[in-house]
């Protein structure tokens, strides 16, 4: 069962709802502050466009010294800041502006965990910075043990964690070498007892050569040197979905899937065939539709989520992120001018919008 994030106002014959709607529209028009939608209708938060808004970003990168080098584009010398001054505008409503104090109060005494690859790390760093900049004088601790990092807002007893599990399923070292086990998910013991889980996997599935972290791939009792990568991705997602269906109590735990975060290495996909990937891109793609279409993995993910028994909310960030060819580190990331990073996102930046949508869901 997949839930795509939508908002609705209850139908009513009373004119009070009409008055309320007008107030909400006036409060939110043009600045994203306050939710507005159609009476009796529903708003798709993921269909929209990017608008210039000088009240963004939500925080200054310099206030978050704990942000990792690969996401710190300004600190790494990126000269322009235009990419930080955009706000996501849904077509039929407005997102409520992120309020870190309110988020922490709502989550007081609870835990949040991102699980996945470096895009989960990207979103985790975004949320911790959004929260810290909202309560800059509050105490916090930051610890890392193995694959698990924990950022604790001690005054609120809120833990915001990330578990680096790039495939979600198990990667095990055996006598024959490193084996990616598509039907095994023993690493999930870290996920139990968490109040909010946000999963993600995709970017590592097509790695080959020196950057591929496994030697063999196993399905059931069959061990192979390789297989169709998209099929492997689907099998692993199905294994994860069965874990959720078996282990999650929806009355106690909220489960999300981040969706497929896109890369921008091929300028032909947005109408600039001579572009050197995302290098020196300074503006989003205009309009509401990405010319290059959606990655195939997005359809595979949705098909798995639709077969699940337990509710999982899809943070369907693919389309809105596809429009942001301008917001990657490019040469202002981990490898500097020796590499080109058009996969991860600068902070402040696009993952802040993912988290702003997440905030609107828990209201």
Image: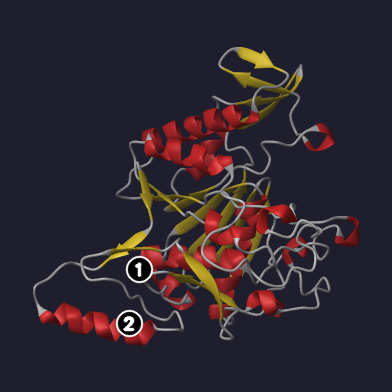
Q: Look at the picture and state if 12 lies above or below 174.
A: below
Q: Look at the picture and state if 219 lies above or below 61.
A: above
Query: Of 359 and 134, which appears nearest the observer?
Result: 359
Colouring convention used in this rendered image of the protein = secondary structure
Task: Check residue 363 in the rendering and tell me which mark sits there, or answer none.
Answer: 1
Residue displayed at 59% across by 45% down: 295
Residue displayed at 58% across by 60% down: 321
Query: 119 left or right of 28?
Result: right
Residue displayed at 67% across by 74% down: 83
Mark 2 near mark 1, Cβ–Cβ under 8 Å? no
Q: Residues within 10 Å of mark 2 (few under 14, many from 20)?
A: some
Query: 44 left or right of 42?
Result: right
Of callouts 2 and 1, the N-terminal one: 2
Query: 81 left or right of 20?
Result: right
Snapshot quadrant of residue 246: top left
Residue 168 x/y as whole percent: 57, 38
Query: 110 left or right of 355?
Result: left
Residue 248 x/y as whole percent: 38, 41
Q: Look at the picture and state if 275 lies above or below 201.
A: below
Task: Check residue 25 in the rendering and tell me which mark sits there, or answer none.
Answer: 2
Residue 40 x/y as whole percent: 20, 66
Q: Which structural element holds mark 1?
A: loop
Q: Residue furthest top?
A: 221
Query: Of 235 and 292, which appears nearest the observer?
Result: 292
Residue 311 x/y as whole percent: 34, 45
């Amino acid at each position: 069962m997949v839930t795509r994030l939508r908002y609705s106002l209850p139908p009513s014959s009373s004119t009070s709802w009409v008055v309320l709607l007008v107030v909400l529209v006036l409060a939110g028009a043009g600045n994203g502050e306050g939710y507005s939608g159609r009476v009796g209708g529903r708003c798709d938060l993921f269909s929209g466009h990017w608008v210039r808004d000088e009240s963004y970003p939500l925080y200054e990168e310099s206030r978050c010294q704990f942000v990792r080098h690969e996401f710190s584009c300004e600190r790494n010398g990126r000269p322009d800041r235009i990419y930080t001054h955009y706000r996501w505008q849904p077509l039929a409503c407005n997102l409520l502006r992120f309020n870190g104090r309110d988020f922490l109060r709502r989550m007081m005494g609870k835990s949040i965990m991102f699980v996945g690859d470096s895009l989960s790390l990207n979103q985790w760093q975004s949320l911790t910075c959004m929260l810290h900049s909202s309560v800059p004088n509050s105490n916090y601790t930051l610890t890392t043990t193995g694959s698990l990092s924990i950022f604790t807002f001690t005054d609120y007893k809120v833990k915001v964690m990330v578990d680096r599990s790039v495939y979600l399923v198990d990667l095990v070292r055996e006598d024959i070498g490193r084996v990616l086990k598509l039907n095994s998910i023993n690493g999930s013991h870290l996920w139990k007892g968490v109040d909010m889980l946000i999963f993600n996997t995709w970017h590592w599935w097509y790695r080959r050569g020196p950057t591929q972290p496994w030697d063999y791939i196993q399905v059931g009792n069959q061990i192979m040197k390789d297989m169709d990568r998209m099929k492997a991705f689907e099998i692993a997602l199905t294994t994860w979905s069965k874990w959720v269906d078996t282990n999650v109590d929806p009355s106690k735990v909220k489960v999300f899937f981040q969706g497929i975060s896109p890369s921008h290495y091929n300028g032909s996909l947005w109408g600039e065939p001579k572009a050197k990937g995302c290098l020196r891109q300074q503006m989003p793609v205009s309009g509401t539709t990405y010319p290059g279409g959606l990655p195939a993995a997005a359809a595979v993910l949705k098909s798995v989520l639709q077969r699940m028994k337990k509710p999982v909310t899809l943070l369907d960030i693919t389309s809105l992120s596809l429009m942001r060819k301008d917001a990657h580190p490019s040469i202002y990331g981990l490898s500097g001018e020796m590499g080109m990073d058009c996969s991860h996102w600068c902070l402040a930046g696009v993952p802040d919008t993912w988290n702003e949508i997440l905030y609107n869901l828990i209201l």
